[in-house]
Amino acid sequence: MDEIHLTVTINAPITAVWKALTDPAEIDKWEGGPAIMDEKVGSRFEFWGGEIHGTNTIVVPKKKLVQDWEYGDWPSPSTVVFELFEEGDVTRVELTQTGHPEEETKDLIDGWKSFYLGAIKELLEDKQKQP
């Protein structure tokens, strides 16, 4: 098993970033849907119509979200931790993923950068540019 650490700075308030991580309507906007998600510990979630699914294990609103992720034929769930840090009108997101198959590390990093955190960054920063 391998470990992934990524830091993404998003030019948007922490409330908007949190909403993009936890609100199904916002998740649909960055193309992670259809999604099932809420902010309750123990609740199940689904992204991309269930392709990625799992359980919220720790929820500290606007600060920390920890999830057990299940995908494909993984032998056990992977743990994904999102930590949010407010820096003025900018939000720094620190992501850690552990427990995933080592041979999938590169693809997972690419996915986080392109289809998940990268997509959230693009959506929210485009919203900030609109008059």
Image (tube, rainbow, N blue to C red):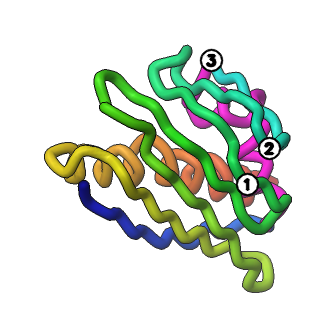
Q: Nearer the viewer, residue 94 or 129?
A: 94
Q: Is residue 41 above or below residue 33?
A: below
Whole-number angstrom distance, CA of label 1 to CA of label 2: 6 Å
Q: Is residue 39 above or below residue 74?
A: below
Query: In the rendering, which numbered label is found on residue 34?
Result: 3
Query: In the rendering, which numbered label is found on residue 39?
Result: none
For disc 1, the marked residue is 58
Q: Nearer the viewer, residue 37 or 69?
A: 69
Whole-number angstrom distance, CA of label 2 to CA of label 3: 21 Å
In which quadrant of the rendered image does the C terminus lie? bottom right
For label 1, the SS is: strand
Write down the quadrant of residue 39 in the picture.
top right
Can you give x and y, in whole percent of width and height, for residue 23 in the image? 79, 37
- At x 69% / y 70%, what residue is drawn? 84
Whole-number angstrom distance, CA of label 3 to CA of label 1: 23 Å
Can you give x and y, in whole percent of width and height, for residue 6 in the image? 42, 68
Q: Is residue 107 left or right of residue 98?
A: left
Q: Is residue 70 left or right of residue 1?
A: right
Identify the mark nearer the N-term, 3 or 1: 3
Write down the quadrant of residue 55 in the picture.
top right
For disc 2, the marked residue is 41
Identify the mark nearer the N-term, 1 or 2: 2
Q: Amino acid at mark 3?
A: Pro
Q: Amino acid at mark 2?
A: Val
